[in-house]
DNA sequence: CACTTAATTCAACGCTTGTTGAATTAGTCG
DNA sequence: CGACTAATTCAACAAGCGTTGAATTAAGTG
């Protein structure tokens, strides 16, 4: 029941995936050429088509990483409500500094150029990450989408300045420092009610 | 002292620039092809080289817009110190919704793919916009860069979600609503001192 | 009216891209 | 040992890219 050649398992497939993640996250979908990925993997370009079909399928395969927001959401919810913001930022930084974060950077870079990737980002941010979190916090549905947008705006800006543009000193700041600065912001976006004399929340 | 052909002045040059701004800001530097720009301008591709030299020079020429942060900075500084955040966000939105904003979107999209554009963004954000503002506010030099990073992270995230990813509802929210939500955040990043028990500012 | 000079057109170059298909190599199984 | 099958290599394709240079057109100048 096991036919075909198998030297040390499929050796080059993984090398290609590794190189693809590296190139895609560093250059984005278009700038990362099939030939460059193959070269970095020490492999003929046609192997990529043989193993993955097309470049776009390789892209999808390279992003197939076990990033399950669910467990993170429950972990963030577990604790005092006043510190949700800080816990969110802390976990956020940990994930984006991991290999899974590289995949995220790749998608984000590509989202700048292709609608289909931007849609991927929107779907993930809202339906998979932020909305479940807001639901777990018991935020009313009519506030959730607006609060979610605000959280997304601050966190995506963090990604942009820290990992894409590499704007110092936020690009190299230790996690704790970033958490102290952004934690209260996220906290306010998530659970803050009114401030000053004006009603900032609710649909308009 | 005025030689050469002049039908209605240089007619196509402006058309090319207009098309270039449109294409660059919508697709970014690489995806916007010289041929597509020429087509949209109703012009032969070689005209672009004739008028501007290379594609990169066209890019630079297309971004040559009178965006002088100086006047904005002084306008923002003019008023009560407690409302600097709101005034900054208000002006920020106005600029990015103008033609000048389209140029900014183009540079930002390109910054995702090319280091030279990322450097352009860094230089502009810090040295031309945020640092002068912080200096005008009398923020100590050792705090300025960190505060500037934070402001940049929130505002660039606004750009990303509103204009690039088009994440609703922040993508379509009226200026006033965004100002109410982000104003206090920017205010805290700019002038906030300590919060809770911890010192969030200062070099670390 | 020549003459000059810039704007414009057209065809083509050299290069890189993703993808393909035939030929070759090399393990596994009956 | 053959037979089989998958992995790999190699050369080439069509398409798109930015750019070039010669030819053509047209407007202002003396």
Image (cartoon, coloured by chain):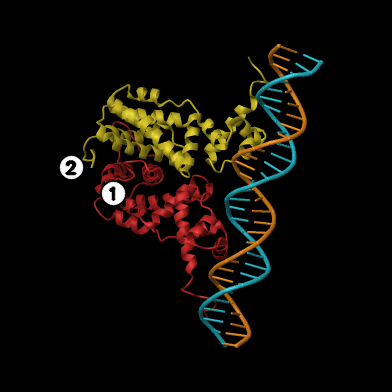
Chain colours: A yellow, B red, C orange, D cyan
Disc 2: which chain?
A
Report which quarter residue A203 is drawn in: top left
B8 to C27, vertically: above or below: below
**What is the quadrant of the C terminus of chain B in the image?**
top left
Which is in the foreground here, disc 2 or disc 1? 1
Q: Is residue A104 visible?
A: yes
Q: Please check whether the numbered discs 2 and 1 fall on a single chain.
A: no
Q: Is residue A176 left or right of residue D22?
A: left
Residue in view at x 46 percent, y 47 percent: B109
A131 to B53, vertically: above or below: above
Residue in view at x 54 percent, y 39 percent: A26
Residue beneath disc 2:
A197
Question: Percent from the top left, x then y, of residue B10?
Answer: 49, 70
Say which element carries label 2.
loop
Residue in view at x 36 percent, y 46 percent: B140
Report which quarter residue B142 is drawn in: top left
Question: Percent from the top left, x then y, of residue A29?
Answer: 53, 40
B18 to A22, vertically: above or below: below
Question: Percent from the top left, x then y, of residue B14?
Answer: 46, 65
Say which element carries label 1.
helix
Instruction: Identify the mark at residue A23; answer none if there is no mark.
Output: none
- Image label count: 2
- Separation of residues labelled 2 and 1 (CA atoms): 18 Å
Residue beneath disc 1:
B175
**In front of the other: A54 or B153:** A54
Q: Are marks 2 and 1 in contact (CB under 8 Å)?
A: no
């Amino acid at each position: 029941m096991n036919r075909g050649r198998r030297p040390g398992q499929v050796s080059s497939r993984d090398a290609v995936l590794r190189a693809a993640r590296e190139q895609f996250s560093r250059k984005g979908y278009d700038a990362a050429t099939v030939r460059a990925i193959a070269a970095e993997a020490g492999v003929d370009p046609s192997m990529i088509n043989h193993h993955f079909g097309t470049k776009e399928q390789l892209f999808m395969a390279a992003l197939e990483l076990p990033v399950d927001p669910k467990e993170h959401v429950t972990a963030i919810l577990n604790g005092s409500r006043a510190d949700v913001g800080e816990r969110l930022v802390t976990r956020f930084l940990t994930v984006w500094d991991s290999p899974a974060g590289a995949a995220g950077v790749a998608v984000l870079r590509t989202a700048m150029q292709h609608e289909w990737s931007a849609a991927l980002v929107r779907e993930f941010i809202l339906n998979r990450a932020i909305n479940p979190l807001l639901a777990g916090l018991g935020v009313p549905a009519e506030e959730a989408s607006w609060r979610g947008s605000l959280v997304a705006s601050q966190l995506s800006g963090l990604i942009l300045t820290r990992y894409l543009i590499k704007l110092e000193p936020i690009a190299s700041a230790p996690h704790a420092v970033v958490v102290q600065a952004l934690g209260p912001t996220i906290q306010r976006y998530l659970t803050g009610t009114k401030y000053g004399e004006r009603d900032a929340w609710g649909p308009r």
